[in-house]
Amino acid sequence: MIPLSSPHVHTPYCDGKSTAAEMAAAALDAGFVSLGFSGHACQGYDPEYAMSAEGEAAYMREVRHLRKEYDGRMRIWLGVERDTFAQADRSLYDHIIGSVHYIPCGEHYISVDGNPTVLADALKTQYQGDGMALAHAYYDQLAHYIKDYRPDIIGHFDLVRKHNRKLELFDEADSAYLRMARPAMEQAFEGCNLLEVNTGGMARSGALEPYPILPLLKHWRQLGGRVILSSDCHLAKQIAFGYEKGLALIRQAGFEQITYLGTGDALFEQAALPRI
Ligand SMILES: [Zn+2]
Ligand SMILES: [Zn+2]
């Protein structure tokens, strides 16, 4: 049996729908051995998605309090999910998930996973309707960010495909798309060798597969990368949503080990995956 855990959980201090206490209770109920909170780091735009400075301080207090409360039952870690343009004091956190949600758009930033109408408009006005060019902007930014910033975990590597079905940005199976994403993955690997297999899109937007898609996950294995299963949870009852599918994908990609948040002092532990 694989130890259950998630390094990626949100609360109402950013855009989560369940409190930290509800998340912890749901995780313990589900049999989790550890749990990592990861509020969206403070940023100067889209305030409803991120923590405020005061909110961040309260978030840290609350998670530290829960860590004590759950001591001996489930190890709780205080983390943060940081976007390229956000701010986080690394010394205050146990783990950092490096994610890209925003790409520059003229004077502003637009999110690739936010309102699809806004993204469609940016596609038209900034990228001449070329979805591959938009994807390139995303991957280029992600690759440089992860390589330079060196987070503990890479968040939802191919988030740019979130609205792909609706907006028809690119063909995910096309070799031209994969020829763009794979070098970005190789560059990111230089800064971080732990990638999440993220089921959050399955829980929240009806995606059929976790991030990233199988060909990219296979490429990650060939590079020698490690994987961690993550629910990117915003609602307590979805604490382990899609985990069967996520594990199946990890095994299908050929991984023999999985990483999870530690149960003691070490941030990460490894478990062997049963062979298929
Ligand atoms: Zn995210
Ligand atoms: Zn998240």
Image: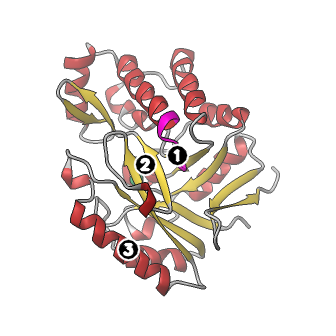
Q: Could you say whether the residue bearing mark 2 is in a helix, strand or loop? A: helix
Q: Which residue is mark 2?
A: 201
Q: Residue at x 52, y 46 (%)?
A: 210
At label 1, the amino acid type is Pro
Crowdedness near tag 1: few (<14), some (14–19) or many (≥20) residues, C-alpha within 10 Å: many
**Residue range highlighted in magenta:** 147-153
Q: Nearer the viewer, residue 217 or 117?
A: 217
At label 3, the amino acid type is Ala
Tell me the quadrant of the picture where the N terminus can be found: bottom right
Q: Which residue is mark 3?
A: 20
Where 215 sits versus 235, above or below?
above
Q: Report how far apart the C-alphas of labels 3 and 1 lie in the structure.
A: 24 Å
Q: Which residue is mark 1?
A: 210
Residue 274: x and y in percent read 80, 56
| Callouts 2 and 3 close, C-beta under 8 Å | no
What label does residue 82 carry, if any?
none
Q: Is residue 250 left or right of residue 151?
A: right
The answer to whether residue 67 is visible is yes
Query: Is label 3 or label 1 in front?
Result: 3
Q: Quadrant of residue 182?
A: top right
At label 2, the amino acid type is Gly
Crowdedness near tag 2: few (<14), some (14–19) or many (≥20) residues, C-alpha within 10 Å: many
Q: Residue at x 22, y 66 (%)?
A: 54
Q: Could you say whether the residue bearing mark 3 is in a helix, strand or loop? A: helix
